[in-house]
Image: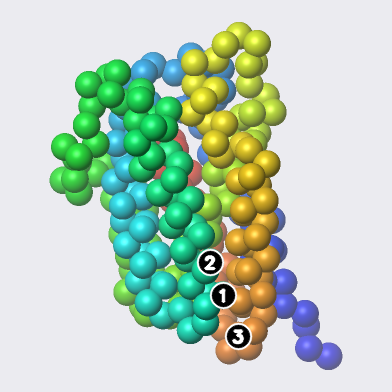
Amino acid sequence: MTQERQGLLAMVERAKPIWQESYQSNFIQEIQAGSLDQGRLVNYLIQDQLFLAAYARFAGQAMALAPTMEDLRFYYSTLSYLADTGNDSADSWQQQFLREQGVNLDDYDQENLKPATKELIAAMQSIVAGGRAEEMMVSLFPCLVSYSYIFQLVADHADLSAENIYADFFKDYATKEYQLACQRWLTYGQQYLEKRQAVDDYKLENIFLRVSRLETLFWQSF
């Protein structure tokens, strides 16, 4: 009897202990407590912007291989969310905070990458360079889903009554809307892989977990 394939949802479950390490990083814990030094948040936002620029390029390359409108809608949806929230939104809390700090993200480029950011980008670049659509797609998921997981934990445990100055920073990733978006993306990804009988599930899981571990190192670098 053929063993049932577990797919993307199983990868998510196996990655949760890794994401828990990200949540336990000093940076995230101090965000949750509202005690983070503002300079460290500035450093994070700069690195996050540089990473997201690379991420958008990788998603664009994967989109070029999308064979159906459903596939195109998935990539369009993820890129649209990145463009409409966070660093890329002109009226976001992040952009307002950076303006108050006198920081213009346009002044930074790949020369300003920290080692952990550079390693994460290089790993994803190597996956994209392989040109296999399913590997590209799987490599993009940890960033999408781990943010929801991590910042939902933050929102659940943060003492918002203490007027945490960073509450507006993490709330976008802890909304019901973002949770539902992640569920839609995961449903798409699960079905996408189920349709492809020739894919190497073991290799795909290793990609998913590798990117997740590198993201943890990214969080731990601040």
What distance separates the C-alpha of mark 3 from that of mark 1?
15 Å
Front residue of 16 and 62: 62
Q: Residue at x 77, y 80 (%)?
A: 4
Q: Is residue 40 left or right of residue 188?
A: left
- Colour mapping used in the image: rainbow
Residue of label 2? 74
Quick check: 29 above or below 141?
Answer: above
Task: State which tag comes first along the sequence, 3 or 1.
Answer: 1
Quick check: 80 above or below 31?
Answer: below
Q: Residue at x 83, y 90 (%)?
A: 1
| Label 2 close to label 1 by CB (< 8 Å) | yes
Q: Which mark identifies residue 196? A: 3
Task: State which tag comes first along the sequence, 2 or 3.
Answer: 2
Q: Which mark identifies residue 70? A: 1
Residue 103, x across and y down, in percent: 23, 27
Residue 22, x across and y down, in percent: 53, 39
* Residue type beneath disc 1: Glu
Residue 214, x across and y down, in percent: 44, 50
Q: Is residue 81 left or right of residue 94?
A: right
Mark 3 residue crowding within 10 angstroms, few (<14) / some (14–19) / many (20+): few
